[in-house]
């Protein structure tokens, strides 16, 4: 039975204190202000993109227990294709979308083609194939209703190709349903912002921006969820999220601060789960900003590396929830550098600034999400930079606004995170260390960092098949970004989640930032 969203929310949130949520529903207290779209061809924000794993399937996916391993999703198997740069996929014969429509080769072709032609934020992942709106249709071949072959132009191997196809942007949508909602040639993008057309365990029943996302069990899916409804309740305040959890009005709470998690560990009826995370947290400078030319000065980048109190952030402020990490590849990825050469050294920073002629009182604005832990970290950065007479003006904004500022280069500096789109070093190298003319709008592009030689090295690493040589190339790339770039990578986080103690089966993987809801029972 489908419950109206307003009725379900009323049932869950007007109950008496300490009342349990319904047994067939999961209630998640979480900030929802970062959501821009649920279209897998467009979604590139934490909550929306992390939700896609519960709504859509691609051809293949990373194994939940061993994320370095690629396993079937909607494809039953794959082999080398008819050309050197090609793969042929055989689909599972009995898969259906939430509409009841069967999943066929036409849906695969439509999904990949529309993602490239829409040219939204995550398209650079598929751009690694060399796909463009002009050549994508000729790169996708229907062999039969259950067989499809993809070809590509770029010099990348089959292993990287598979990992690219495990990214959310390669999710398969129901072409019949999406086509029915197409408006003015938008490939159904406007409709998919708030709806879904997938084949995974859940589908979107209703979405009210910033307030609630209601998922309902997909009866046609081959992934059999144990809970009928998942309600993501938009709760902007972290203290309110914690209270909902402790009172029993929420089963799960995300986005709590270190002190709140510490309190939950000693609170009856709840528990704290910790999962590995690929998120790395960094300070970035917009080198194209015209109001503050110092942001383009490599001396400021160097000084900044000695003005972050890494250990203070990790151990004192964040109580070990985040670990010091200074490379763009997270621990857990092949070739990730784990050395931490920088520490708080105000005198060294002052010497660098003085030598470069950067005057005391130099100021810039720091944009960050107005949620924990970003506000606390931003204040700590403001305090440590002030010791070297560098003035940081704080600019807290809703998460969706932050992404808008980043993608339009409308910021001076930013503190935020980057999460892996697939489990391969190229996923982060291709955004931190790649910026070419008329290329994708990567993180390097967003900060205006011109790096033709490093971009070529990044491209070379992606094309290298020898594991040892490839690992060494990524170490070279990481070293350059670590030592001399407008990025100051500071932390790698573990994902902590507050749970009621009756929630069982909670799991999330290195490459995603939300639980697999289909595994949860109460």
Image: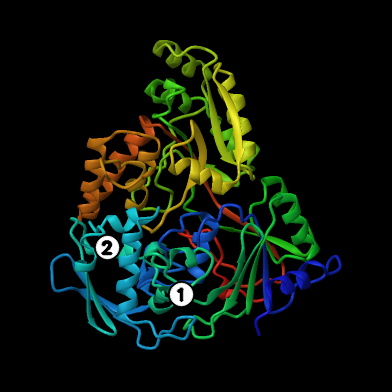
Residue 87 visible in the displayed image? yes
Q: Report whether 490 appears left or right of 440.
A: right
x and y percentages locating residue 458 in the rendered image: 26, 45
Q: Nearer the viewer, residue 367 or 358?
A: 367
Do the residues bearing badges 2 and 1 touch, measured as CB atoms within 8 Å?
Answer: no
> Which residue is most to the front?
184
Residue 167 visible in the displayed image? no
Is disc 2 placed on a helix, strand or loop? helix
Give the number of the mark in front: 2 or 1.
1
x and y percentages locating residue 211 in the rendered image: 67, 60
Q: Which mark is residue 198?
A: 1
At label 2, counting other C-alpha atoms closer than 10 Å, the crowd grade (few under 14, some 14-19, many 20 or more) is many
Is disc 1 placed on a helix, strand or loop? loop
Give the residue at x 55% y 62%.
Answer: 514
Instruction: Give the mark nearest the N terminus, 2 or 1.
Output: 2
Q: Which residue is mark 2?
A: 161
At label 1, counting other C-alpha atoms closer than 10 Å, the crowd grade (few under 14, some 14-19, many 20 or more) is many
x and y percentages locating residue 140 in the rendered image: 23, 70
> Which residue is most to the bottom?
94
Q: Nearer the viewer, residue 132 or 341?
A: 132
Q: Nearer the viewer, residue 297 or 348?
A: 297
x and y percentages locating residue 215 in the rendered image: 59, 72
Mark 2 and mark 1: Cα distance apart in space: 22 Å
Q: Residue 84 occupies which quadrant of the picture?
A: bottom left
Give the residue at x 67% y 51%.
Answer: 256
> Which residue is most to the left?
83
Q: Which mark is residue 30?
A: none
Give the residue at x 36% y 42%.
Answer: 432
Q: As displayed, is residue 72 above or below residue 43?
A: below
Quadrant where the C terminus lies? bottom right
Give the residue at x 55% y 52%.
Answer: 494
Q: Report whether 51 appears left or right of 116.
A: right
């Amino acid at each position: 039975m489908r419950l109206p969203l307003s009725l379900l929310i009323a049932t869950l949130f007007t109950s008496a204190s300490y009342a349990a949520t319904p047994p067939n529903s999961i209630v998640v207290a979480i900030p929802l202000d970062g959501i821009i779209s649920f279209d897998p061809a467009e979604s590139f924000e934490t909550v929306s993109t992390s939700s896609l794993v519960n709504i859509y399937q691609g051809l293949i996916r990373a194994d939940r227990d061993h994320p370095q391993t690629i396993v079937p999703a909607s494809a039953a198997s794959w082999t080398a294709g008819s050309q050197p740069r090609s793969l042929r996929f055989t689909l599972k014969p009995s898969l259906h979308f939430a509409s009841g429509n069967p999943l066929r080769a036409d849906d695969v072709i439509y999904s990949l083609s529309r993602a490239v032609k829409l040219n939204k934020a995550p398209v650079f992942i598929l751009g690694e194939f060399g796909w463009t709106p002009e050549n994508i249709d000729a790169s996708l071949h229907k062999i039969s209703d259950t067989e499809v072959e993809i070809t590509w132009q770029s010099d990348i191997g089959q292993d990287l190709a598979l990992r690219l196809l495990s990214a959310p942007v390669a999710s398969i949508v129901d072409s019949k349903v999406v086509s029915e909602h197409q408006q003015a040639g938008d490939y159904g993008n406007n409709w998919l912002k708030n709806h879904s057309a997938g084949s995974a365990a859940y589908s979107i029943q209703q979405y009210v921006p910033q307030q609630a996302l209601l998922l309902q069990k997909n009866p046609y899916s081959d992934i059999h969820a144990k809970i009928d409804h998942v309600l993501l309740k938009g709760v902007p305040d972290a203290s309110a999220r914690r209270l909902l959890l402790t009172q029993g009005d929420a089963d799960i709470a995300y986005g709590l601060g270190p002190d709140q998690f510490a309190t939950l560990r000693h609170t009856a009826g709840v528990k704290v789960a910790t999962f590995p995370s690929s998120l790395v947290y960094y300070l970035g400078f917009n080198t194209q900003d015209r109001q503050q030319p110092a942001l383009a000065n490599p001396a400021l980048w160097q000084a900044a590396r000695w003005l972050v109190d890494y250990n203070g952030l990790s151990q004192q402020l964040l109580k070990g929830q985040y670990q010091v990490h200074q490379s763009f590849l997270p621990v857990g990825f092949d070739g990730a550098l784990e050395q931490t050469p920088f520490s708080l050294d105000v005198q060294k920073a002052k010497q660098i600034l003085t030598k470069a002629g950067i005057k005391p009182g130099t100021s810039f604005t720091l944009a960050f999400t107005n949620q924990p832990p970003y506000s606390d970290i931003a204040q700590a950065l403001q305090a440590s930079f002030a010791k070297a007479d560098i003035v940081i003006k704080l600019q807290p904004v809703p998460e969706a606004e932050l992404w808008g500022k980043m993608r339009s280069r409308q910021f001076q500096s930013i503190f935020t995170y980057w999460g892996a789109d697939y489990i391969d070093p190229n996923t982060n190298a291709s955004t931190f260390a790649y910026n070419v003319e008329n290329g994708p709008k990567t993180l390097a592009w967003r900060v205006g960092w011109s790096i033709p030689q490093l971009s070529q090295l990044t491209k070379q690493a992606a094309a290298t098949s020898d594991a040892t040589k490839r690992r060494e190339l990524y170490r070279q790339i990481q070293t350059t970004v670590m030592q001399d770039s407008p990025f100051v990578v500071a932390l790698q986080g573990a994902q902590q989640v507050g749970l009621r103690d009756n929630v069982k089966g909670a799991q999330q993987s290195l490459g995603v930032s939300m639980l697999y809801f289909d595994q949860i029972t109460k």
